[in-house]
Image (tube, rainbow, N blue to C red):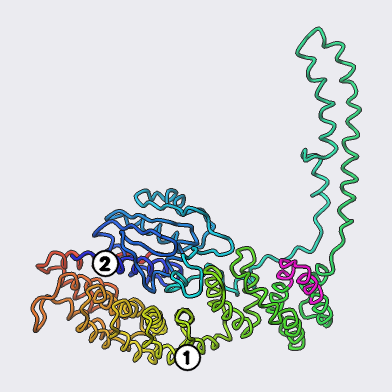
Amino acid sequence: MAVPSSPSIIARFARCVELFRDPTLKDEQKAAFRALMESLQSEPFRLRDEGGSIVVNGTPVEGGAVGPLTHRLALHNVGEVSIPRRAPPLEVFELVKALAEPPGQGDIPTRLRTAGAFSIVVALGTAPISPAEQGPPASGAGLGTEGILRGEPMTDIRSPKEWVSGVPRLTYDPPPPSAETSLPAQGLGGPADAMQPEAAPPVAPPVAPPVAPPAAPPVAPPAAQPPVAPPTQPAASKTPARPLSPADRALKDLAREPQAPSVGDVLAVLGQEAENALRGNRIEVFLAIVVEVVRQEQHVTDESARRHYKIALRRMLPKATLQRLAPLVTVPTQRAEAIVALRRSGAEGVAVLLDRLVSAPGVGERRGAFDALRQMSEGTEQLIKMLDHDEWFVVRNMAELAGELAMEEAVPALARQLTHSDERVRKATALALAKIGTTSAAEALRRALHDKSADVRMQVALGVGGRRSSGLVMALVVALDEEKDEAVQRELILGLGRIGTPDAVQALIKFSQARRRLFGRRPTVLRVAAVEALRLAGTAPAIGTLEGLAEESDRQVSAAAKAALEELKKPPKR
């Protein structure tokens, strides 16, 4: 069996990590993981992050799929990953799962040791991630340099819907008196602690028996202990002295009756308090007010009350304020609340983030804007216009974003960019069209399958899959006959397996046969890929073909077919 190339291995590794971020894609996860394990059977795998550039087994690797993996490595502060040849699948599974999950659950080396994964070595980066960037610093921080937003950027941001319903609510009521009155009794610096040294001398005399009788009189004044109790009373009297702020009172009223007749007055008070907080640079207070108003707006059904909310939020979030909030999407402690505010602003919030994506000075800022834009639900049509931007990196970023959002309306503009002079733009465009995968994207993808760059053709092969790509079966079959790059051929075959329609399975059955009509025997490595693709399809004709291939004279094909049949018999993992 031919040894998979570095681009093929890293593409499969990156795809596996990305799919594991979505728990609903069970079948795609299993298919990608099996493909990854097949690649790891041939040789050790060593991945190193060198300032945003990925080096695999000593070879620098670039491609649309590398960008998301670079971001995941940066989020987890991972500098190097070393996987031995034929590593245990469970250990590789733990590594992929750890990279796919958000950071904050312990560093990856510790998690792997806890899970019993000792053969895989993960080295952390030389320095922790900068809170301001949450991503790897690029070697060139200027616009358009290498390492910015490659492939499929991911965001570890929970969806705004989760934040609207999940942001901790403000506590409006003062703490109970016991919170303060208990402090002296716990030895936290209260007056009771000041009495402790006087009680200590009577304990010492029992060391010398002759001195014990004279020591009795000093011990007698335990009557001095009653003053211990009184100090707790003044402490208790301090609690009721803290009045609620106007913002606290207004938020409490809003939470109690979000659509009361007086809700307009309550929202006016909150608007003034939000303005005061912003003017005083108390961003946390401002965001807390905005998020709570957005949260309560979700529960309002009365049309009159909804108008009050709409007016109040429009006044709280003018464009100048949104521009001030945009940089916060890279600040971990304020990112989620800032996205809630920007998302609620609709098209205007999208416009501010797009401006920042173009003009931000550093990689971290651009990545934060990109991740925030993925959370937007309206106003994204503005990015279609930017697909014709003069700067190549802007076009690439917009293409990636259109693919992330599966924007079918962006297909015509994306198709125009398949002739772009910069290969990086064409790769991003091809992957975006494959992700969209609708009938309208099929013709453009056929053209991408004939691009002069193997990397561009690889992006199409990696991106296709599922019933939405059923219209591409014949295009993939034709491309297979014309393709000369073996790595691209393998991915095209696996793409047919992911599509899994009857036409795709019939093409795979023919491709799994040993002989071709005109050119002799088919390479074993491609027949083994066809076996894996038949397993991915898993239909009755595919299983019947695998049973026949299990008796093949070619030992590699026979072993692969038997392994595929065993895998299909296993119950799906939950």
Instruction: From the viewer's side, name the closer residue of 455 and 261.
Output: 455
Instruction: From the viewer's side, name the closer residue of 25 and 75.
Output: 75
Label 2: which residue?
5
Image point (29%, 65%), residue name: 6
Majority SS type along the magenta span? helix
Q: Amino acid at mark 2?
A: Ser
Q: Which labelled disc corresponds to residue 180? A: none
Left or right of residue 329, residue 489 in this image: left
Left or right of residue 92, residue 480 in this image: left
Q: Quadrant of residue 454?
A: bottom left
Q: Position of residue 261 (x, y in %)?
A: 83, 83
Q: Position of residue 316 (x, y in %)?
A: 74, 79
Q: Amino acid at mark 1?
A: Glu
Task: State which mark lies toward you, 2 or 1.
Answer: 2
Q: Is residue 174 above or below residue 541?
A: above
Label 1: which residue?
409
Left or right of residue 20, residue 132 in this image: right
Image point (87%, 48%), residue name: 236
Q: Is residue 436 above or below residue 549?
A: below
| For the residues bearing labels 2 and 1, Cβ distance under 8 angstroms | no
Image point (66%, 73%), residue name: 325
Q: Is residue 241 above or below residue 311?
A: above
Instruction: Bin the neighbour count of mark 1 within 10 Å (Cα to Cα): few under 14, some 14-19, many 20 and up.
Output: few
Q: Position of residue 91 (x, y in %)?
A: 36, 55
Secondary structure category for the residue under label 2: loop
Instruction: From the viewer's side, name the closer residue of 352 and 505.
Output: 352
* Of the image marks 2 and 1, the number of the one nearer the N terminus: 2
The residue range painted magenta reads: 271-289
Q: Position of residue 324 (x, y in %)?
A: 67, 74
Secondary structure category for the residue under label 1: helix
